[in-house]
């Protein structure tokens, strides 16, 4: 897992606010997230888990680790004739899931 330093978050928030994160990492699977945990990066740390950036308003630089959730994937399993179990990764865009 690569942790980048002093990264602009402008492209990662829908307001387009040009602020920087002291550290930035992307997790594309559960194993990557577990790696951050095992490395002690989240214990007593200042971190923010960021999705699509539409529910966050940055007012200044973020002095911590921004973890961008890129865990995608949609699975559907028929439970019975009238029910389907849908499992989606936390990084799946809502519009993609419901279409």
Image (tube, rainbow, N blue to C red):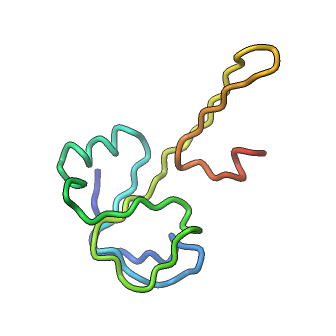
Q: Is residue 42 left or right of residue 71?
A: left
Give the image location of residue 91, x and y in percent.
53, 50
Give the image location of residue 46, x and y in percent.
27, 66
Quadrant of the rendered structure where residue 76 is? Answer: top right
Q: In this view, does 49 lie above or below 14?
A: above
Q: In which quarter of the image is the C terminus?
A: top right
Quadrant of the rendered structure where residue 75 is? Answer: top right
Closest to the observer, 23 or 77: 77
Closest to the observer, 61 or 28: 61
Q: Which residue is drawn at 75% across and 45% down?
A: 98
Q: Which residue is drawn at 59% across and 48% down?
A: 92
For the image, the number of numbered tags is 0
Q: In this view, does 8 lie to the left or right of 94?
A: left
Q: Which residue is drawn at 46% across and 80% down?
A: 58
Pick out the residue farthest to the right: 82
Q: Is residue 79 left or right of residue 88?
A: right
Q: Which residue is drawn at 72% across and 53% down?
A: 95
Give the image location of residue 78, x and y in percent.
72, 19
Give the image location of residue 68, x and y in percent.
43, 58
């Amino acid at each position: 897992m690569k942790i980048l330093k002093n990264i602009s978050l402008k492209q990662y928030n829908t307001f387009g606010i040009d602020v920087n994160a002291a550290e930035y990492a992307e997790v594309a699977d559960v194993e990557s997230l577990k790696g951050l945990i095992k490395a002690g990066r989240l214990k007593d740390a200042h971190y923010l888990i960021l999705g699509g950036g539409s529910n966050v308003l940055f007012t200044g630089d973020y002095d911590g680790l921004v973890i961008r959730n890129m865990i995608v994937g949609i699975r559907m399993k028929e439970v019975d004739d009238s029910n389907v179990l849908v499992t989606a990764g936390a990084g799946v865009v809502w519009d993609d899931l419901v279409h």
